[in-house]
Amino acid sequence: MEPREVVTLNRIGSGHYVIGGRSPAELRLARWRYRAEAFVGGQRYELRRTGIIDRGSSVRGADGAEVLCLSRRHPNVPGLADVDWRIRARWRGYEARLTSPGAVELTVRTGHGGRSDVTAEIAGTLPNRDLVLVAAAFAVLLRRREDTDAAAGAAASTAAVG
């Protein structure tokens, strides 16, 4: 594997992230739905949550066709074979890993709370690098949002019962 590259998606506003560096890419989360839009290399993409049990994220191009999908059971990243995708909660945030044996290892992390940047470490060659980074960041941020919403709902129901 090649040396690791570290990329930061800087949070510049509520639900708005940009990749600094070589090429412009940004992610804009919808405020109340599990959707987002991304701009990578001058093209617009729509990102959505998929599945109920096998939660994942899907990226669709301007024509509405799926470009890539990050889910545990059915990950689809064009240009990579035998892809494995996992997201997990950590002590201070969330972490996702995308691996393809002998080709690439991508780790995406976010801190705890809604004001943190998203960092990614890449080892190997990642086809459609910035689009995959944005999709992975969306998936991690979405998981954090879902868990936060669930915790708030549980607290509200406990307060209503008590």
Image (cartoon, rainbow, N blue to C red):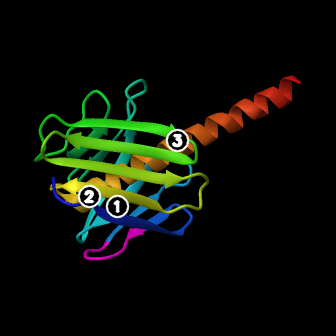
| Residue 91, horizontal then vertical, whole percent | 57, 42
Between discs 2 and 3, the one toward the N terminus: 3
Q: Which residue is mark 1?
A: 38
Looking at the image, can residue 34 be seen?
no
Q: Which mark is residue 131?
A: 2
**Label 2–label 1 contact, CB within 8 A:** yes
* Front position among marks 2 and 1: 2
Graded by Cα atoms within 10 Å as few (under 14), some (14 to 19) or many (20 or more), the crowding at tag 2 reads many
Which sits in the foreground, 104 or 150? 104
Q: Which residue is mark 3?
A: 90
Tell me the residue at 24%/47% (across/down). Answer: 105
Between discs 2 and 1, the one toward the N terminus: 1
Between discs 3 and 1, the one toward the N terminus: 1
Helix, strand or loop at mark 3 = strand
Q: Amino acid at mark 2?
A: Leu
* Quarter-of-image position of residue 77: top left
Q: Amino acid at mark 1?
A: Ala
Q: Which mark is residue 136?
A: none
Please say if 16 is above or below 162: below
Helix, strand or loop at mark 2 = helix
Graded by Cα atoms within 10 Å as few (under 14), some (14 to 19) or many (20 or more), the crowding at tag 1 reads many
Which residues make up the magenta segment? Answer: 18-24
